[in-house]
Image (cartoon, rainbow, N blue to C red):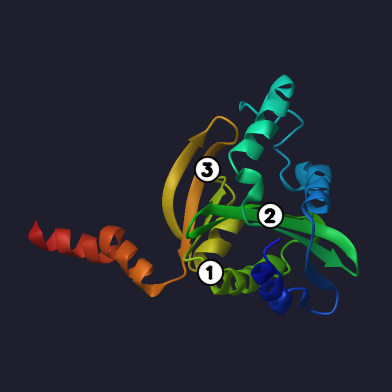
Amino acid sequence: MNEKFENLRARYFPLAIRDEYEVISSDEKTATQFLHEHFSRVFPRENESGHQGTLLTAPERKSIIAELSEKTGYNSLHKEHFLFLKRGNPVGWSTGETMDFMTYYMRNTGILPEHQNRGLYSIFLQTLTKYLEEIGYERLSSQHSPDNSKMLITKLRAGFMVTGMDLDERWGSLVRLTKFLKNDRAKAFSNCFGRRLIEQTTKKN
């Protein structure tokens, strides 16, 4: 594991949230095991075979995908795994990894229903953003179901922008959000797609 990441991570995590909760860095096995055990509680439309009407990897091909992950270098990417705890007991998770040389992909986050709507994710997101920016990332990216209004609103309030729509045979339709961690990137996006461009186009017409 990269020593730089370890040292920086230790400055931000564990993250205490109020008196009862904290977010800790976790190893991949522990975090993903908790994710798999509780995924259907957080995302109830999912089942063992995946999102209704979509396709996950056939069991007989999983070993091939695992081998491909190793050969292509995916397993060596910078990855982050966190667990949300209440008095030492896991109540949520967050995982992600390098998407490209300047983008961190927030792959999946879930908090058990009985612990939602307490501001845990918003506080975690603020700290995670500072940590990833200090590492050197310039963009954060995530994907969400179009009807996951709570998460979409939370991300938009945190400065994320809608940057696309993905149609995925594994997960269905997904809204892609991006947060620009550098002002020049945010300005470039606004110049290309934002209100300023709309105003200029309107004036020309």
Secondary structure beneath label 3? strand
Q: Residues within 10 Å of mark 3 (few under 14, many from 20)?
A: some
In the shown orientation, is residue 170 left or right of residue 185?
right
Residue at the image point whose x is 50% and y is 63% from the top:
156
Residue at the image point whose x is 79% and y is 79% from the top:
18
The residue that label 2 is drawn on is 95
Task: Please determine whether, in this image, residue 53 is positioned above or below residue 28.
Answer: above
Q: Residues within 10 Å of mark 2 (few under 14, many from 20)?
A: many
Q: CA distance from mark 3 to mark 1?
A: 19 Å
In the image, residue 42 lies at what x, y percent? 75, 48
The residue that label 3 is drawn on is 174
The residue that label 1 is drawn on is 158
In the image, residue 137 lies at what x, y percent? 51, 65
Residue at the image point whose x is 71% and y is 69% from the top:
6
Q: CA distance from mark 2 to mark 1?
A: 18 Å
In the shown orientation, is residue 122 left or right of residue 163?
right
Q: How many marks?
A: 3
Q: CA distance from mark 2 to mark 3?
A: 18 Å
- Where on the picture, by quarter, is residue 112? bottom right
From the viewer's side, name the closer residue of 36 and 68: 68
In the shown orientation, is residue 131 left or right of residue 24?
left
Residue at the image point whose x is 74% and y is 73% from the top:
13
Q: Furthest-left residue in view? A: 204
Which amino acid is tagged 2? Thr
Quadrant containing the C terminus is bottom left
User: What numbered label is drawn on residue 40?
Assistant: none
Quadrant containing the N terminus is bottom right
Secondary structure beneath label 1? loop
**Which badge, 2 or 1, is on the more N-terminal residue?**
2
Task: Please determine whether, in this image, residue 144 is positioned above or below residue 4.
Answer: above
In the image, residue 70 lies at what x, y percent? 66, 39
